[in-house]
Image (cartoon, grey):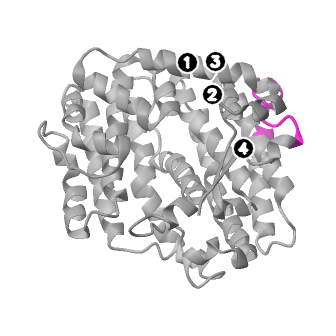
């Protein structure tokens, strides 16, 4: 729950916060009795409470497939993320991971905390995977194979250019979008979606995370994790880590703003993808993270705190988004509100301000042209107080 001071400043968030807390507790009570499924869903709630909540709204068959898909990719990501694992050990595991998911006895010890438990007891995930319909299995295997190969490629390759950046984000997140679209179609709930739009759904989320997590990644021990493309940051500093130093604050913010502007390139595709969804539960499952992403970008833009700590949306605002996102009108409205917030933060003296404003105006136009802004129930910006970062945790 959010701290008392924040709650008192935003009393309209109290009820959604209590609803969210209750919904999470209820979701955690719905853990299946079968041991392997119980492990999967309890692990899901441990590694991502909000995702664990939204996934519960899906039908049982699709929910199980998405749960397994998520955990398989979290496990793959854990192998990639663990900088203590030697490259010569890591790369073969990444490339063969799509085969390991068929092996009930396979596990590999790496990661920390909940992720270490996931890896040590991965046989439970494999057991659940083997109970899915063959169509779901094939989709999960295909994406895992492609993602593992892509991750292995970038273990041995720096993110040099913006094209490299897009390619890396495709492997680690765009493919998630493609995989989810395949699962949705396989369930019979949705029509086939274009790979391009599915890819953009993943890239928008991944680029937001890479921007937000700069400090955590650059301070990773024993080795920094660097995903910001050299083509962008080399214009401002000699080394990517130099952006975190106070003497480079002006350059850091300018570089950050270029990164945010780049992420905004995917917004129209994301709105197009979501507008085509038919099933309400799938729609909410897709829409809530996208709204969180545009909100996070709005908070990060022109914000030096990205290089000092972790900038996140307020828990109460997150609760409102989860509670009140129900229609495409709500999505257009939220994107409109956060785009307006972004526009208000653009400094005309910023070298990239013209590009940023052009992007924002395009987003605002799409939202206005939808003709739905007056029909929405969700309003995420009601006062200037929302313009301040939700949470800033300072890190050394």
Q: Secondary structure at mark 3?
A: helix
Q: Which of labels 3 and 2 is toward the front?
A: 3
Q: Which is more N-terminal, label 1 or label 2?
A: 1
Measure the C-alpha gap from mark 4 to mark 1: 22 Å
Query: Residue at (47%, 19%) from the top-left corner?
Result: 27
How far across and how far down the image is residue 162, in percent? 53, 71
How many numbered marks, from 0 up? Answer: 4
Q: Which span of residues is magenta-colored?
A: 367-384
Q: Secondary structure at mark 2?
A: helix
Q: Which residue is disc 2 drawn over?
A: 322
Query: Residue at (74%, 22%) from the top-left corner?
Result: 14
Name the side, left or right, on which 96 lies relative to 172: left
Q: Which of labels 2 and 1 is toward the front?
A: 1
Q: Secondary structure at mark 4?
A: loop
CB-based contact (under 8 Å), mark 1 and mark 3: yes
CB-based contact (under 8 Å), mark 2 and mark 1: yes
Residue 156: numbered disc: none
Q: Residues within 10 Å of mark 2 (few under 14, many from 20)?
A: many
Q: Residues within 10 Å of mark 1 (few under 14, many from 20)?
A: some
Q: Residues within 10 Å of mark 4 (few under 14, many from 20)?
A: some
Q: Nearer the viewer, residue 221 or 235?
A: 221
Query: Residue at (28%, 23%) from the top-left corner?
Result: 37
Name the side, left or right, on which 236 lies relative to 241: right
Would you identify the image quadrant in which residue 373 lies? top right
Q: Which residue is disc 3 drawn over?
A: 19
Residue 390: numbered disc: 4
Compared with 4, 262 (above or below) is below
Would you identify the image quadrant in which residue 69 lies? top left
Q: Which residue is disc 1 drawn over?
A: 23
Query: Residue at (60%, 59%) from the top-left corner?
Result: 395
Q: Residues within 10 Å of mark 3 (few under 14, many from 20)?
A: some
Q: Secondary structure at mark 1?
A: helix
């Amino acid at each position: 729950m959010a701290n008392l001071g924040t709650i008192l400043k935003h009393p309209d968030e109290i009820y959604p916060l209590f609803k969210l807390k209750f919904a999470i507790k209820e979701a955690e009570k719905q853990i299946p009795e079968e041991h392997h499924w119980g492990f999967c869903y309890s692990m899901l709630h441990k590694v991502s409470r909000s995702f664990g909540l939204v996934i519960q709204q899906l039908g049982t068959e699709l929910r199980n497939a998405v749960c397994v898909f998520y955990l398989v990719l979290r496990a793959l990501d854990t192998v990639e993320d663990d900088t203590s694992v030697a490259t010569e050990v890591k790369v073969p595991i990444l490339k063969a991971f799509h085969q390991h998911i068929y092996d009930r006895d396979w596990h590999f010890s790496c990661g920390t905390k909940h992720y270490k438990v996931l890896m040590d007891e991965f046989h439970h995930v494999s057991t659940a995977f083997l109970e899915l319909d063959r169509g779901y299995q094939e989709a999960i295997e295909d994406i895992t194979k492609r993602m593992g190969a892509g991750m292995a490629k970038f273990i041995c390759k720096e993110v040099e250019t913006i094209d490299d950046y897009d390619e890396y984000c495709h492997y680690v997140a765009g493919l998630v979008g493609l995989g989810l679209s395949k699962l949705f179609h396989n369930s019979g709930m949705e029509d086939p979606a274009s790979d391009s739009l599915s890819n953009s759904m993943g890239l928008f989320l991944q680029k937001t995370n890479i921007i937000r997590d700069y400090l955590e990644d650059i301070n990773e021990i024993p080795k920094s994790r660097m995903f910001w493309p050299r083509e962008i940051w080399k214009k401002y500093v000699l080394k990517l880590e130099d952006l975190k130093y106070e003497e480079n604050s002006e350059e850091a913010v300018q570089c950050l703003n270029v990164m945010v502007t780049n992420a905004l390139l995917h917004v129209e595709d994301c709105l197009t993808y979501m507008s085509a969804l038919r099933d309400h539960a799938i729609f909410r499952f897709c829409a809530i993270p996208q709204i969180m992403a545009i909100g996070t970008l709005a908070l990060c833009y022109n914000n030096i705190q990205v290089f000092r700590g972790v900038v996140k949306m307020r828990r109460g605002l997150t609760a409102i988004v989860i509670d009140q996102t129900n229609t495409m009108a709500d999505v257009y409205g939220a994107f409109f509100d956060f785009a307006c917030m972004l526009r208000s933060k653009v400094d005309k003296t910023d070298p990239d301000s013209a590009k940023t404003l052009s992007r924002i105006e395009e987003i605002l136009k799409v939202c206005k042209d939808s003709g739905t802004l007056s029909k929405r129930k969700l309003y995420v910006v009601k006062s200037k107080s929302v313009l301040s970062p939700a949470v800033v945790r300072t890190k050394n």
